[in-house]
Image (cartoon, helix red, strand yellow):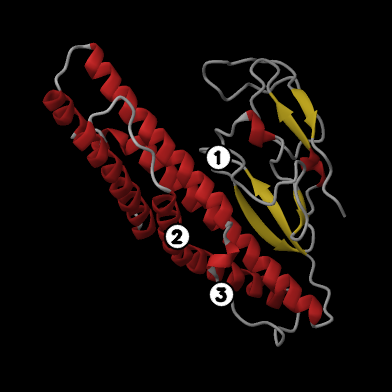
Amino acid sequence: MVPYEYDIKSALNAQIDKQVTRATLEVSDKAEDATDQENNDLSDEILAILLLLMQMRGSKIYNDGLSLALAAGLDLSSTSKFTAAISDADNTYMVDAVKSFNNDTSIGISKMIADAKTNGATNEEIRVLLASFTSAQVNRVNRFALNESWRASEMSGTNAILQLDSELNNGKQVAPFYKTWRIQATACPICIDYANVSIRINEKFFGGVDAPPVHVTCRCMLTYSIFKPDDAKAQLEMHCSGCDRFLGMTYRESPTDDLKCPISKCGTLAIPTVRAVKPAST
């Protein structure tokens, strides 16, 4: 487990413990929500943890971009280095995410108390039961930590190339950096239509999206290039006609009749449908 994920999980668990402690003392029908101060403090703590990740990831991507520019014969004298800042992250988004997480905690505690009372448990028995609540939240805590780490990582990569692109072009050089959306083999239908789409670094993908993730558990990522990748054929993406899964064969000129869906539970042997993706802007 990487340090920043562990630290985020520790911060979340500490907040859960606070809410459990209040519920244990009161054993009222409804658990108290986290205070505004607790929401803001937790948001600030998580953003501070993510700052290290943003700096590490952004610096790596920035240096990779420098290598691309050097290979293209560009003068790097106008470049500097990538420096992440808390302001790079959306504080409003994080406060809202934390509020939602803490609200779900209150709902979970209230439900545990209500169920226990329905079953005739005493207050002391309920207190014993509540002692196990935090440890039962491991999946929810892990998901939040990984999702927000992924979001910060992709955002800082994009910010790094945006900075480099601006520095090179302010130096009167033609340095058109592009970002390309890469999906995993198990990508969901939401992400499939973004697969291999390349656009300028300062543009948005269709739907107004700057970078992954586009939903909870999205694990798509961006790769970066200088000058537009020669992947026009990737704008037509092949899907199985049986289960509509992306077949990962974007460079075929046209569908053929001898393709078998790689999903073992499907196994369809047929001409796949072709879903058109909005062409990347030039």
For the residue pair 237 and 208, the one nearer the viewer reads as 208
Q: Secondary structure at mark 1?
A: loop
CA separation in Å, label 3 and label 1: 26 Å
Q: If the image is split into quadrants, where does the C terminus sit? A: bottom right
Q: Position of residue 82 (x, y in %)?
A: 58, 75
Q: Quadrant of residue 200?
A: bottom right
Q: Position of residue 150 (x, y in %)?
A: 51, 50
CB within 8 Å, label 2 to label 3: no
**Nearer to us: label 3 or label 1:** 3
Q: Amino acid at mark 3?
A: Thr
Q: Is residue 248 visible?
A: no
Residue situated furthest right in the rendering = 282
Check residue 182 in the rendering and tell me which mark sits there, or answer none: none
Q: Quadrant of residue 275?
A: top right
CA separation in Å, label 2 and label 1: 24 Å
Q: Position of residue 9 (x, y in %)?
A: 34, 49
CA separation in Å, label 2 and label 3: 19 Å
CB within 8 Å, label 3 to label 1: no
* Residue with the mark numbered 2: 44
Report the side of 22 relative to 210 (left or right). left
Q: Is residue 268 visible?
A: yes
* Residue at 37%, 53% in the rendered image: 8
Q: Amino acid at mark 2?
A: Asp
* Residue with the mark numbered 1: 218
* Residue with the mark numbered 3: 83
* Residue at 18%, 25% in the rendered image: 126
- N-term mark: 3 or 1: 3
Q: Position of residue 107 (x, y in %)?
A: 38, 29
- N-term mark: 2 or 1: 2
Q: Secondary structure at mark 2?
A: helix
